[in-house]
Amino acid sequence: MMRLSVAHRSECGGREANEDAVGFCANETQGCFVLADGTGGHEGGALASSAVVKEVLTYFSATPKINDDSPGTLLSVAREALSEVRKLNLQYPEMNTTIATLVMDTERGIAYWNSLGDSRIYLFRSGRAHCLTTDHSILQSMIDAGFFTGELRGNSRRNMLYAAVGSEELPEHAIRDEPFSLRTGDVFLLCTDGFWENVGEDIMEEMLQLAKTPEQWIDDMMDELPEPYAPDLDNFSALAVWVGEREAETTRILAESHQQE
């Protein structure tokens, strides 16, 4: 049986308010993990992200079923939660939020996810990072179409989104509704753009190689932030999920590969 280990952190960065929200509902073998990054300015963004995370987890805790319908259903719950909080806070009619939701059942060895906006879900298998989600940003769509060949990180237009929880239509690749097969030793990372903008995949891999617990991994990655409270630094949040035991042989092979590079 593959057991789950979880850790998360959320920080303001250089901003006055934290518009990120993160949480999970899980036991040793089954769980729902969700992260959101509010948009729309200060209280509006914080209200949106916290409402969405709360309602998704409330729904899952009452109906802890994981199947092909789960990612779509949970996304619908998030969209309804945003609609309701907008009605209750008419002073923030444009409030919105990104979302990234991961659900998994390690007894059956399956996972599903959804995402809207530019919060990401990474899989680390044999120590290597694989981004499972697509950023719904204008710049990413230009890169995908071959109209832009520069770097996404550091670009001032990177956070211009064309889709988030409040969007009328869902873009492609918003939902993974086919079962993804888990392996023991798999590691997942959900993170907001304020995190992945400042922590590259190479650092994620390096810190994972050294970490003995999910808590240590997140702390070590956040220690790599150049100036965690610089005025221009966005909120940054991360949620780590470790599946089963990390294999000593995988760690050894990864260490040797880094030495050869």
Image (cartoon, rainbow, N blue to C red):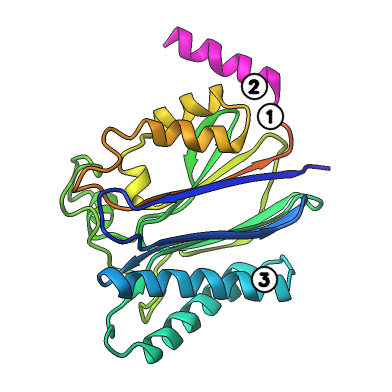
Residue occupied by mark 3: 60
Three-letter amino acid code at the position of disc 2 = Thr
The residue at 72%/36% (across/down) is 184
x and y percentages locating residue 250 in the rendered image: 64, 21
**Numbered tag placed on residue 227 in the rendering:** none
User: 113 left or right of 174?
Assistant: right
Three-letter amino acid code at the position of disc 3 = Phe
> Could you say which is closer to the camera, residue 126 or residue 245?
245
Residue occupied by mark 1: 246
Relative to 100, say whether 85 is above or below. below
Bounds of the magenta segment: 247-261
Give the CA distance from mark 1 to mark 3. 27 Å
The reply to whether residue 34 is in sight is no
Give the CA distance from mark 2 to mark 1. 8 Å
Q: Within the magenta stretch, is there residue 46?
A: no
Relative to 197, say whether 200 is above or below. above
Residue occupied by mark 2: 250
The residue at 15%/51% (across/down) is 156
Relative to 146, say whether 259 is above or below. above
The residue at 18%/40% (across/down) is 150
x and y percentages locating residue 73 in the rendered image: 60, 75
